[in-house]
Image: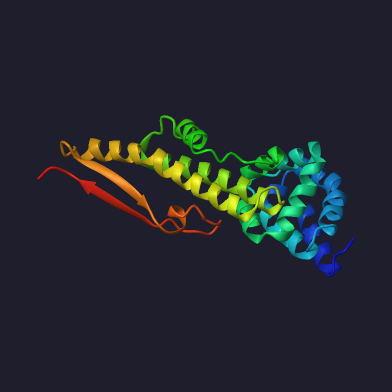
Amino acid sequence: LGFTDAPAVVAMVRSWHHGHYRAMRSQRARELLTELVPVLLAAFGRSPAPDAGLRRFDRFLAGLPAGVQLLSLFYRNPKLIELMAEIVGVSPRIADQLTQYPVLVEALLADDPNPETSPAALLADIDRALGESRGEEELYDRARRWVGDHRFRVGVALLRGRIGGEEAGRAFAAIAEAAISGLLPRIAANFAEAHGIVPGGEIAVLGLGKLGGREMSATSDLDLILVYDAPD
């Protein structure tokens, strides 16, 4: 099938069937896996780096809290397995994102040819996502999930050649700007509730570096300066 270390692949698959991972402990999960293994191996065998891709998929399975829902998704959508193998096989970073946030697998189904990059649309979307967050911790959690989902979509589009590097840079910057714009008034309101406000005070956020130049990458940090002004 294209793998170079067949014994390692056999041992990996056997460990899945033995229920060594939490996701594989239910009988239904193992039944679904039995149906899917030939398709999974064939898909990863056709990927650019079969052994590395399957190892990353193994780490993905190891991190899942449960497996029935995801395996059912694969079972109903065979093309998702092909897409997973293609992407995980060539991008360790996206594989790590999927391991950390398995819910992003559903974003692969959308397979957006053109991820949303309009600043106005992104800001409206994050406003909906943040909604009536209760407390700062929930606010940050929702923001992280929103940013992760949109960055993931742009990364997949870039990886599949749907968009170029310059367009991806602008898209990553637009996502960052929407997150900052969506969070700032909420954080300011929380701060005012706890500490009060200075009458006539104002605040601005400056985005420097790659954010300011609209040329961010998937690994860029945010270089920000907060500027405050208030009457004497």
Residue 178, horizontal then vertical, whole percent = 45, 41
> For residue 49, what is the image quadrant?
bottom right
**Does residue 63 show up?**
no
Residue 165, horizontal then vertical, whole percent = 62, 55
Residue 218, horizontal then vertical, whole percent = 56, 56
Relative to 219, 99 lies left or right: right
**Does residue 111 show up?**
yes
The residue lying toward the viewer, choosing from 155 and 24, is 155
The C terminus, quarter of image: top left
Indicate whether 87 appears above or below 80.
below
> Residue at the right extreme?
1
The color scheme shown is rainbow
Relative to 208, 46 lies left or right: right
For the point 55% across and 47% down, the residue is 171
> For residue 2, what is the image quadrant?
bottom right
> Residue at the left extreme?
232
Indicate whether 159 appears above or below 31.
below
Residue 228, horizontal then vertical, whole percent = 23, 48
